[in-house]
Amino acid sequence: MRKIKYDSSSLPQRICVIGTSGVGKTTLAHGISQRLMIPHVELDYLYWEANWVEPPLDVFRSRVEKCLVGNSWIVDGNYSKVRDMVWGNADTLVWLDYSFGVVMSRILWRTFYRVVTQQEVCNGNHETWKKALSKDSVILWALQTYQRRRREYPILFKNPEYSHLNIVRLSSPQAAKDWLSNLAS
């Protein structure tokens, strides 16, 4: 894993935060955005339309392309459909690689909270008990993708098209908190 130490003259400017569902990508990306004063893009907002409708691929890619204009941005999400665009244009990739127990406790708590409070997820969409307990459940998705992502990401990092990326692998919420607090401090 490539790791770099940042100083005020070499701060990351085009950052992608990845990790399994529920790990805290959006929360960390928001924190980085606030700290570095750069725009934050949530891929979920670009992907999911009202009523959980998926857009055509060309529409999704066009939305992402428009958000990647400029020298500074932070994107959170794992959409392989736009990985080439996001990773290809990023300078830094932050991987939240937390333990299975941390991920599952977070996804269960977040889902419960969103269902009970009817907190909007994106574009007017809400989680429901029916969805949480269905084959389309974000909990089931996290269970299905956790190990796959842990195997897949290190392999992808070795691809020549991503050799320019500075990889920051954070293995715990405390490591993420420490990294963020040291960023531009």
Image (cartoon, grey):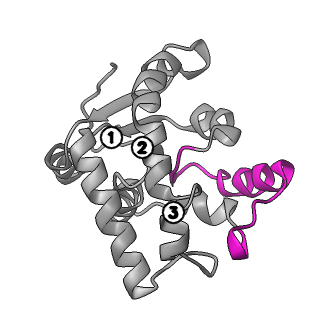
Asked which secondary structure carries label 2, the reply is helix
Q: Which mark is residue 116?
A: none
Spatial separation of the CA atoms under disc 3 and disc 1: 19 Å
Residue at image coords 85%, 49%: 58
Mark closer to the observer (3, 1)? 3
The x and y percentages for residue 57 are 82, 48
Give me the C-alpha separation between circle 3 and circle 2: 31 Å
In the image, residue 88 sits, relative to residue 156, either above or below, namely below
- Label 1 to label 2, Cα distance in Å? 40 Å
Q: Which residue is mark 2?
A: 143
- x, y (%) of residue 160? 58, 12
* Disc on the earlier residue, 3 or 1: 1
Q: As rendered, which of 62 and 99 lies closer to the eye? A: 99
Instruction: Work out whether residue 34 or residue 42 is closer to the camera in this orientation and state it.
Output: 42
How many other residues sit within 10 Å of disc 1, few (<14), some (14-19) or many (≥20)? few
Residue at point 34%, 20% (across, down): 2
What mark, if any, has residue 39 been given in the picture? 3
- Amino acid type at circle 1 is Ser
Q: Amino acid at mark 2?
A: Leu
Numbered badge on residue 9? 1
Q: Which mark is first along the chain, 2 or 1?
A: 1
Q: Is residue 54 magenta?
A: yes
Query: Circle 1 — which element?
Result: loop
Q: Which residues are magenta?
A: 49-78
